[in-house]
Image: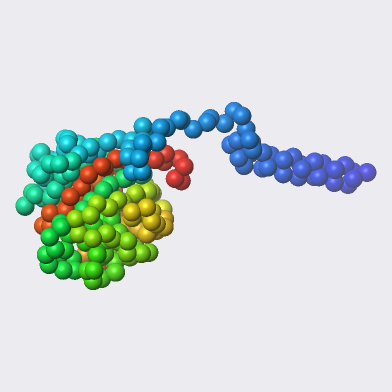
């Protein structure tokens, strides 16, 4: 009798435990009407134009959201005709605001006049968090190393395709970036990830970063802040930028 009661009790405890783990595993029930619905966002009027929830980083006229990387002074890049252009010896520029996880839209054009070759031709770069470069380069009929051509995660991951338009032509990057996560002791717990669409075509598909961009050596993570400025590179070529906007992404969804 006693063993029968014990058996029934064990079964009850097991069933209760199974029930708890089943309903406790998820925050929301399937089709839960209490689940918060997403905010309404109005999309841009044309492909590539900023939606209503975007932070406008450059609208073609106002460069005030940017400053010189070297000293925080006013960004001295040339602004005219709806774009900004790398100016001679002006140096890299960075956003005054700092960002972590984000979607970034940016349009660029390499100089129409072809000069030099390989890495010397239309070189610039978009540095996410100022550390992780999505390469900007005139890769139209311009051979260079694969992990350094347009759309490469420089020194790490070549783009899936070369979809570079010719010199002087406007092209777009749509970048989805998830920053790396670090433990309190500084060790990496989750690598950064980057997705890039170049002229609307996927060229980096949620690629894991190996660490901050390096030249001629392997990247290695080093702990840094959760938010840092975006940097545009002055590589000595008169690359132009326009229509730059960004959406901050929910950290929670990226976990
Ligand atoms: Mg570069």
Residue sitting at the far top: 34
Q: Position of residue 121 (x, y in %)?
A: 16, 63
Q: Position of residue 112 (x, y in %)?
A: 15, 57
Above or below — where is 216 with respect to 134?
below
Whether residue 62 is situated above or below residue 145 in the rendered picture: above
Coloured how? Answer: rainbow
| 7 left or right, relative to 198 | right
Relative to 179, does residue 237 appear above or below in the rendering?
below
Q: Is residue 1 left or right of residue 195?
A: right
Q: Name the residue located 23 percent from the left edge and 57 percent from the top edge.
A: 136
Where, quadrant-wise, is the N terminus in this rendering? top right
User: Between 47 and 182, which is closer to the camera in this rendering?
Assistant: 47
Residue located 16% across and 44% down the image: 84
Count of picture labels: 0
Report the residue that reaches farthest toward the left: 88
Q: Nearer the viewer, residue 132 or 170?
A: 170
Residue at (23% x, 71% y) in the render = 143
**Which of these two is toward me, 46 or 193?**
46
Q: Is residue 32 left or right of residue 145?
A: right
- The answer, for residue 20, to whether it is visible in the render is yes
Q: Position of residue 97 (x, y in %)?
A: 24, 37
Which corner quadrant of the image does residue 161 belong to? bottom left
Q: Position of residue 235 (x, y in %)?
A: 14, 57
Identified at 26% across, 48% down, the residue is: 107
Q: Is residue 71 visible?
A: no
């Amino acid at each position: 009798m006693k063993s029968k009661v014990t058996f029934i009790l064990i079964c009850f405890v097991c069933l209760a435990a199974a029930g708890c783990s089943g309903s406790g595993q998820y925050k929301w029930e399937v089709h839960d009407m209490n689940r918060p619905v997403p905010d309404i966002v109005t999309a841009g009027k044309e492909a590539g134009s900023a939606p209503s929830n975007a932070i406008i980083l450059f609208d073609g006229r106002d460069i005030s959201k940017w400053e010189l990387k070297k000293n925080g002074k006013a960004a001295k890049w040339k602004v005219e005709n709806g774009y900004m252009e790398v100016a001679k010896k002006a140096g890299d520029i960075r956003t005054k605001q700092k960002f972590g996880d984000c979607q970034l839209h940016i349009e660029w054009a390499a100089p129409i006049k072809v000069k030099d070759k390989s890495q010397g031709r239309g070189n610039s770069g978009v540095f996410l968090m100022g550390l992780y470069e999505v390469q900007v380069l005139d890769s139209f009929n311009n051979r260079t190393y694969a992990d350094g051509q347009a759309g490469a995660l420089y020194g790490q991951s070549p783009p899936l395709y070369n979809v570079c338009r010719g010199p002087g032509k406007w092209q777009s990057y749509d970048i989805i970036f998830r920053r790396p996560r670090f433990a309190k002791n500084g060790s990496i717990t989750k690598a950064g990830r980057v997705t890039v669409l170049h002229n609307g075509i996927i060229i980096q598909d949620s690629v894991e970063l190996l660490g901050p961009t390096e030249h001629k050596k392997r990247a290695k993570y080093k702990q840094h802040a959760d938010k840092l400025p975006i940097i545009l590179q002055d590589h000595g070529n008169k690359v132009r930028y326009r229509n730059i906007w960004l959406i901050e992404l929910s950290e929670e969804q990226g976990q």
